[in-house]
Amino acid sequence: MMIFTIQGVDQWLGDADLKSITGSDLLFNASYIQFDFVPQTNSISFNFLFASEEYQENYQCTFGDVFAFILTDSNGVSTNLAIIPNNKLPVSVTSIRPGVTGECDRRNLSYFDKINGADSAISFHGQTVSMTAESLVVPGDSYTIKLVIADNRDSQVDSAVFFRSRKLFFGI
């Protein structure tokens, strides 16, 4: 499992690619991993879950930490793979939430897993269900992927993305 988190201050700015591809307005504390690759198959996929401290109180109504899996092909065309299926919204606290009575409605509740308690395996207030970022690719072509996460509208309450590890087994 790989963990990708954000935490910091207002002076640690956001990411122009993340702002552009998600439409998020005021980003802070952006962190990213970026690499080039040449696929040998016609598709790629990552299993992940998004967790955040913003699933407490009414933060989920306004402060939407956001992340993206930005896949860029050899022609420079970029696509966010971290989207909610069927509506193409970026995965964030404000796009997947249980809601707060009198403050904001539920959104895409089928993708929200739970509010975590003290005995949770992860120390974030809430989390999504396991989701998949996936895309068709052309074997042999060059691609870049950028996994980027940032605070949106505040720099204090943090989020993380957890990736499922894939184990390869070889044997006879």
Image (tube, grey):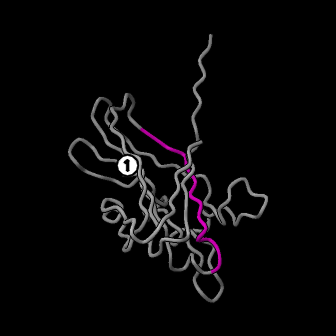
Task: Answer left or right for 120 relative to 162.
Answer: right
Q: Residue furthest right?
A: 119
Task: Answer left or right for 161 relative to 34.
Answer: right
The quarter of the picture where residue 55 lies is bottom right
**Number of marks in the rendered image:** 1
The quarter of the picture where residue 161 lies is bottom right
Give percent across and percent down for residue 101: 66, 85
Give percent across and percent down for residue 89: 44, 65
Crowd tier of the residue under label 1, counting other residues whose Cα lies within 10 Å: few below 14, some 14–19, many 20 or above: some
- Which kind of residue does numbered mark 1 sit on? Lys
Is 53 magenta? The answer is yes
In the rendered image of this protein, does residue 157 appear above or below residue 170? below
Task: Answer left or right for 33 relative to 128.
Answer: left
In this view of the protein, which residue sits in the foreground, 138 or 161?
A: 161
Query: In which quadrant will I find the C terminus?
Result: top right
Is 92 magenta? The answer is no
Mark 1 residue element: strand
> Residue at 49% of width from left, 58% of height from top?
85
Q: What kind of secondary structure does the magenta stretch mostly adopt?
A: strand
> Residue at 41% of width from left, 47% of height from top?
33
Chain part drawn in magenta: 44-57
Query: In which quadrant will I find the N terminus?
Result: top right
> Residue at 46% of width from left, 69% of height from top?
9
Give percent across and percent down for residue 104: 57, 83
In this view of the protein, which residue sits in the foreground, 165 or 107?
A: 165
Give percent across and percent down for residue 21: 33, 62
In the rendered image of this protein, does residue 160 appear above or below residue 72? below
In this view of the protein, which residue sits in the foreground, 68 or 158?
A: 158
Q: Residue furthest left?
A: 75
User: Which residue is identified by label 1?
Assistant: 146
